[in-house]
Image (cartoon, rainbow, N blue to C red):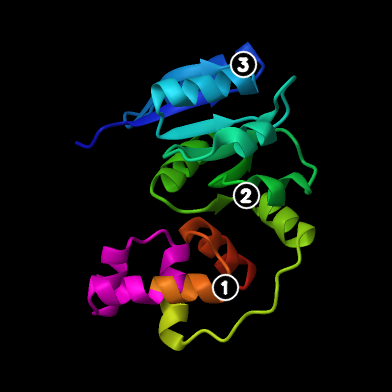
Amino acid sequence: MSDPIRLLLVDDHPVVRRGLRGYLELEPDLVVVGEAGDGEEALAAIAALDPDVVLLDLKMPGLDGQGVLDRLGESRSRILVLTSATDAERVPSAIGSGAAGFVYKDIDPDALASAIRTVHSGQLLLSPVAMRGLMNGSTAPAAPNLTPRESQVLGLIAKGQTNRQIARALGVSEKTVKTHVTNLLRRIGAADRTQAALWAVRHGIG
């Protein structure tokens, strides 16, 4: 059995954190390794605990969730925004700052556990409401002319597949996949695979 997914809960309401811990730790593959009540505590906890996934509220006093995303820098932790905010303009900013997912606090507990597993696997996860906010809150640039193979690779990146998995799926070498990834990132102006996946979602690829 693989190691459990290590979680950090970031919310300024202790009752919310307690509730999240209570039902998430019923899942055998999830374990809460820490909690934080504000943005400064969150940054310190991420640095100290190195969690796999951070459940991050956006609305907090002092340094809020967006501030955490803006200051996080290089971190292997995947950030899943879990917020009660429904203002759509927050979605593009959060995803653009590196969040791997965006869901709301009215999400079903089983769906939340599934969302955690999804972002942990490397995929981008947006609730339907967040997806509408993303599409309404930003204007996608015109799509460049990708080759059919580049479009295939991009679609598989959007599904969270690694270069090795893509190579197997397409029957090509991993080196060839790396070349395609480098080329398509340059074409679409993406800095990394997460940005590429976001671009693919905006353009209906994948």
Quarter-of-image position of residue 31: top left
1 and 3 marks in contact (CB < 8 Å): no
Q: What is the span of residues highlighted in magenta in the rendered image?
A: 154-180
Give the labeled residue for mark 3.
37
Q: Amino acid at mark 3?
A: Gly
Instruction: Give the residue displayed 60% in from the left and 73% down from the top.
Output: 204
Instruction: Give the residue displayed 61% in from the left and 16% down from the top.
Output: 37
Quarter-of-image position of residue 42: top right
Crowding at dot 3, Cα within 10 Å, few <14 / some 14-19 / many 20+, comes out as some
Q: Amino acid at mark 2?
A: Ile
Please, what secondary structure does the residue beneath circle 3 have?
Answer: loop
- Name the mark on residue 108: none
Of pointers 2 and 3, the one earlier in the residue sequence: 3
Q: CA distance from mark 2 to mark 1?
A: 17 Å
Say if the magenta span includes residue 169.
yes
Of pointers 1 and 3, the one earlier in the residue sequence: 3
Say if the magenta span includes residue 167.
yes
Instruction: Give the residue displayed 78% in from the left and 60% down from the top.
Output: 136
Q: Nearer the viewer, mark 1 or mark 3?
A: 1
Q: CA distance from mark 2 to mark 3?
A: 22 Å
Give the labeled residue for mark 2.
95
Please, what secondary structure does the residue beneath circle 2 have?
Answer: helix
Instruction: Give the residue displayed 59% in from the left and 66% down from the top.
Output: 199
Q: Amino acid at mark 1?
A: Ile
Q: CA distance from mark 1 to mark 3?
A: 38 Å
Residue 192 at x, y percent in the picture: 48, 59
